Image (cartoon, rainbow, N blue to C red):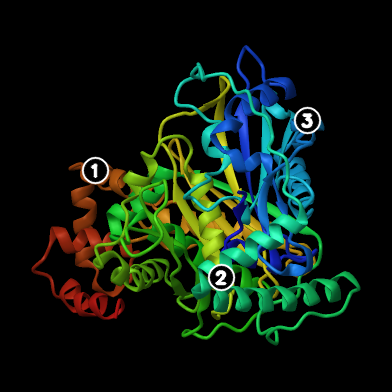
């Protein structure tokens, strides 16, 4: 008997449109090392591991007339070479060229006639590196029966473990008549599932009508756009990457409190604020941007997963109206305080210690949660998943960078995925090409927002935003006083004392005079003036 598609997975398929494919992607940048890494090596790696995720060799089989949920059936014509594809950049390919290619790849919907995933090997990157772009449909990975392929193709050592040989033989697909009959008998035995199925079917019909309208170019229903983030989607994307040091994020956390996740979210908040200001948007002090932030939890009442925790959505108001970066961080930390105090939060160290590269699975689960709560009034999705802090390898090739690519949904033109790995934090920004034509500027604003937070840890008393490192101004000031303390300068300081009319000397001499002759009246009168100016 084939596995039936669950209602949640049916909803994900039904919500998909040509302008909003429901797939999560990840970009893995690899250093091939002396042994190299080509398409044949990648295909052998996947062929060795795919038995661990049987659903990656199954396709969706609809039931005639929509009388019952679709079924997962083995793809009798499964062709691994169709799913493992090869591409190349003109050498030496830059990250900008890779981002352009990724934007085109993630905008294309997956073929529903085949298993819902694709993987691309991109050769020709500078420094001899290669990239792997993995696309997986949200309906394919539920965290319970199936994890992401990206989690199982990465190992903790350069030498991949030996696995037993896989002698897979696809099962014959059931006929439409047998699927429909089995569905009827199943509902008779489980009548409590009928209302939920009817609701899911109705939603599927509604979403199918929306897809048909989208295919002929009809405008989709949705809220009236109130910000650049709430726009109807096109069929093209822009992809931007930002990389930063994990130690910098930890320094901000250690200085101001909170968690690394708080720092990430406050950096995103600062980036959105700066970007909106460059577009001439009016931002009152109380302005916020509502974000859906999936968080890992331990909830015994929720559906269990193979990862030891679940993912729950959290609606967070990002305080873009706050101009001070430290105050933004405190506001974000306070907003998430209730989640931390429930006792259900999962520590980042625990997530990072999971076997394999579990962050790819968690990003998929986060996207599923965000889609399941699409009716809530949020404007973008932000996922942040900690990964291992030691190098991992794909068939001996060392992973040097990883960027998640979250899907967009109608009237939500921006999504940001974040993964920390091996001492770095990698931000992947997916934006609609037409709605957010200046996505590269948003990426620069994000880099600036991270640096702005880091600056506050270097000298908390004098850290003017947007200026040079304060250490460069403090160092000369420390060196000057010893140069002015020789005895030869003491008589020179006493000579002006006899000439009262010439009291308006440079401020530097008066400061010295205050230290040398504290009993004089002139310095005593100027002391109060120095205390008033800071107020």
| Left or right: residue 300 compared with residue 174 | left
**Can you tell which mark lies on residue 81?**
3
Q: In which quarter of the image is residue 523?
A: bottom left
Q: Which mark is residue 498?
A: none
Q: Nearer the viewer, residue 311 or 443?
A: 311
For marks 2 and 1 on the same chain, the one whose residue lies earlier in the sequence? 2
- Whether residue 81 sits left or right of residue 531 in the image: it is right
Would you place residue 411 above or below residue 383 in this image?
Answer: below
Dot 3 falls on a residue whose secondary structure is: helix
Mark 2 surroundings: few (<14), some (14-19) or many (≥20) residues within 10 A: few
Residue 28 drawn at (x, y percent): 61, 37
Q: Is residue 45 above or below residue 518?
A: above
Residue shown at 77% from the left, 72% from the top? 208
Q: Quadrant of the C terminus?
A: bottom left
Q: Is residue 395 left or right of residue 506?
A: right
In the rendered structure, find residue 482 and report the number of the disc placed on it: 1
């Amino acid at each position: 008997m084939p596995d039936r598609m669950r209602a949640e997975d049916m909803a994900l398929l039904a919500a998909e449109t040509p302008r909003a494919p429901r797939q999560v992607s990840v970009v893995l940048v690899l250093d091939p090392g002396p042994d190299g890494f080509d398409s044949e090596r990648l295909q052998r790696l996947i062929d060795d591991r795919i038995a661990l995720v049987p659903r990656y060799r199954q396709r969706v089989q609809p039931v005639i007339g929509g009388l019952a949920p679709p079924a997962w059936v083995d793809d009798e014509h499964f062709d691994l070479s169709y799913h493992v594809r090869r591409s190349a950049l003109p050498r030496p390919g830059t990250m900008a060229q890779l981002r352009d290619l990724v934007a085109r790849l993630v905008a294309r919907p997956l073929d529903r006639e085949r298993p819902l995933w694709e993987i691309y090997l991109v050769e020709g990157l500078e420094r001899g590196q290669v990239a792997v772009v993995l696309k997986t449909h949200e309906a394919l990975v539920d965290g319970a029966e199936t994890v992401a392929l990206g989690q199982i193709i990465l190992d903790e050592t350069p030498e991949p473990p030996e696995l037993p040989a896989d002698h897979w033989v696809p099962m014959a697909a059931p006929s439409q008549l047998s699927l429909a009959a089995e569905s009827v008998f199943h509902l008779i035995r489980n009548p409590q599932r009928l209302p939920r199925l009817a609701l899911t079917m109705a939603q599927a019909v509604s979403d199918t009508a929306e897809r048909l309208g989208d295919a002929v170019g009809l405008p989709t229903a949705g809220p009236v756009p109130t910000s650049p983030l709430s726009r109807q989607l096109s069929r093209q994307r822009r992809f931007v990457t930002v990389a930063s040091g994990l130690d910098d994020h930890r320094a901000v956390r250690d200085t101001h409190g909170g968690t690394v996740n708080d720092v990430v979210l406050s950096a995103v908040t600062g980036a959105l604020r700066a970007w909106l200001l460059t577009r001439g948007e009016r931002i009152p002090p109380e302005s916020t941007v509502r974000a859906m932030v999936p968080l890992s939890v331990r909830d015994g009442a929720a559906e269990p997963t193979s990862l030891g925790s679940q993912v729950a959505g959290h609606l967070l108001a990002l305080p873009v109206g706050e101009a001070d970066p430290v105050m933004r961080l405190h506001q974000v930390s306070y907003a998430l305080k209730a989640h931390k105090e429930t006792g259900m939060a999962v520590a980042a160290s625990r997530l990072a210690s999971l076997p394999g590269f579990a962050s790819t699975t968690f990003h998929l689960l986060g996207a599923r949660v965000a889609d399941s709560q699409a009716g809530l009034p949020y404007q973008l999705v932000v996922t942040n998943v900690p990964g291992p802090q030691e190098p991992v390898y794909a068939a001996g090739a060392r992973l040097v960078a990883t960027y998640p690519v979250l899907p967009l949904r109608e009237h939500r033109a921006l999504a940001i995925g974040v993964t920390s790995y091996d001492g770095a934090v990698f931000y992947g920004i997916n934006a609609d090409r037409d709605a957010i034509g200046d996505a590269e500027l948003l990426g620069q604003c994000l880099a600036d927002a991270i640096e702005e937070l880091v600056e506050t840890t270097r000298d908390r008393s004098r850290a003017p935003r947007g200026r040079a490192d304060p250490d460069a101004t403090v160092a000369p000031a420390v060196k000057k006083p010893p140069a002015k303390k020789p005895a030869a300068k003491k008589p020179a300081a006493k000579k002006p004392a006899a000439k009262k009319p010439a009291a308006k000397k440079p401020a530097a001499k008066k400061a010295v005079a205050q230290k040398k002759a504290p009993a004089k009246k002139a310095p005593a009168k100027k002391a109060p003036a120095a205390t008033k100016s800071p107020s």
